[in-house]
Amino acid sequence: MQHSPLIQQLIDAFRRLPGVGGKTAQRMVLHFLERDRDGGRKLAAALTAAMDGVGQCRLCHTLAEAELCLVCAHPGRDIHTICVVETPADVYAIEQTASYRGLYFVLMGHLSPIDGIGPDQLGIAGLIERVRNNPVNEVILATNPTVEGEATAWYVAEQLKSEDLIQRGLRISRIAHGVPMGGELEYIDGSTLMHSLSGRLLINNPGRSQ
Amino acid sequence: MQHSPLIQQLIDAFRRLPGVGGKTAQRMVLHFLERDRDGGRKLAAALTAAMDGVGQCRLCHTLAEAELCLVCAHPGRDIHTICVVETPADVYAIEQTASYRGLYFVLMGHLSPIDGIGPDQLGIAGLIERVRNNPVNEVILATNPTVEGEATAWYVAEQLKSEDLIQRGLRISRIAHGVPMGGELEYIDGSTLMHSLSGRLLINNPGRSQ
């Protein structure tokens, strides 16, 4: 079936979204055309406003409309800790836990030489400068537990191990790998189980659980 | 986590889509902001163009940009048959089979008194007029095999059983209910199996199979 040009064009535009195929795109288009034209217009306006108005935070590089993102601009955050993540979605995920009060640095990707993404593209030199010029006590490396994420974390850690930062007592940490809460050991992959065992915490020694 | 206003507004706009929750909406927004701003702008433009430019076909009531939809405007279609469906998506589904060459009438819903949708809202009087004033030989009722769809088909059939149309030899048919192709009898529900048995076709009598 040939859709009429405007409808086909809109279906094609929706298909650029991740995980949206032809059928889903058609359902979205028909939803707006049949039942929610106002919603369609609102989405168009919100898209235009966001595409033009959202840039990157000067400090942590996450998506932000102002010069600083909401986290960096918040006066109550702990400026002594920086958490390094790959994407803004990781920031949202950590913020959702409401258990972290420090600042962030968003790499906007991971080292991937084959795609031409090196330390310069991720702004790692800027991160090192920021750590050097601010009273940062700890850098938490929270890149993904994938090959690229691990390599990126390793690279950032190596760059942070400069003489002046070590003398200052800077702590460099990596998020724990292990068995996810609610999971069953039986179904956990071997690599995760291995990390879970080697990274075990003594429960009769409160000193180590920090 | 509080998203910045423009991002939150865009997430909310995407959440109006069927089957899109908070997580999916966030993923869509981040996709456009991080990787495809051009795609985001294109989607906004396509949305605006479609919301303002797509209306309904004068003849069959499906979504169309011109006065007539592509099917009604096509000179090669069989004007003696009208297939009555609930939504434009049903038209697309039937067109995809490439086995139907007649015209359509799209009800844009089904009878649902509880929602205030009666024969007037579906334009059924207009359908009867169209059948009466054109050389239509057959009306195929292809509403959904749901309670509302069946009731709607029954109502349309009753309206078509007027004296002049019966004298003209108008055929009124309902799409076949039965076992879907590729399905396994074991997993088909009883109601479908019952229809499949009562609607069985003789295979040694070609005359009955259309």
Image (tube, coloured by chain):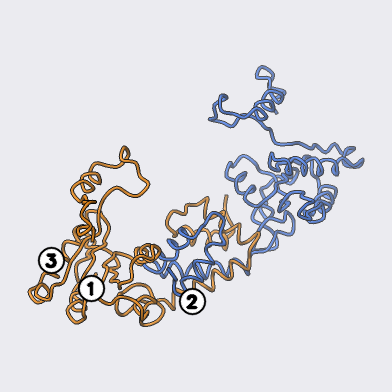
Chain colours: A blue, B orange
Vertical position of residue A125 compared to residue A207: above or below: below
Q: Which mark is residue B23?
A: none
Q: Label 1, on which residue?
A: B123
What's the residue type where badge 1 is placed? Gly
Residues at marks 1 and 2, CA–CA distance in whole angstroms:
27 Å
- Mark sitting earlier along the chain (1/3): 1
Q: Is circle 2 on the same chain as circle 3? A: yes
**A91 over A25 or under it: above or below:** above
Label disc, if present, on residue B158 of the rendered structure? 3
The N terminus of chain A, quarter of image: bottom left
Q: Are marks 1 and 3 on the same chain?
A: yes
In the image, taking residue B85 as reference, residue A112 lies left or right, namely: right
What residue is pinned by disc 2? B49
* In front of the other: B114 or A83: B114
Who is closer to the viewer here, B19 or A82? B19
Element type at marker 1?
A: loop
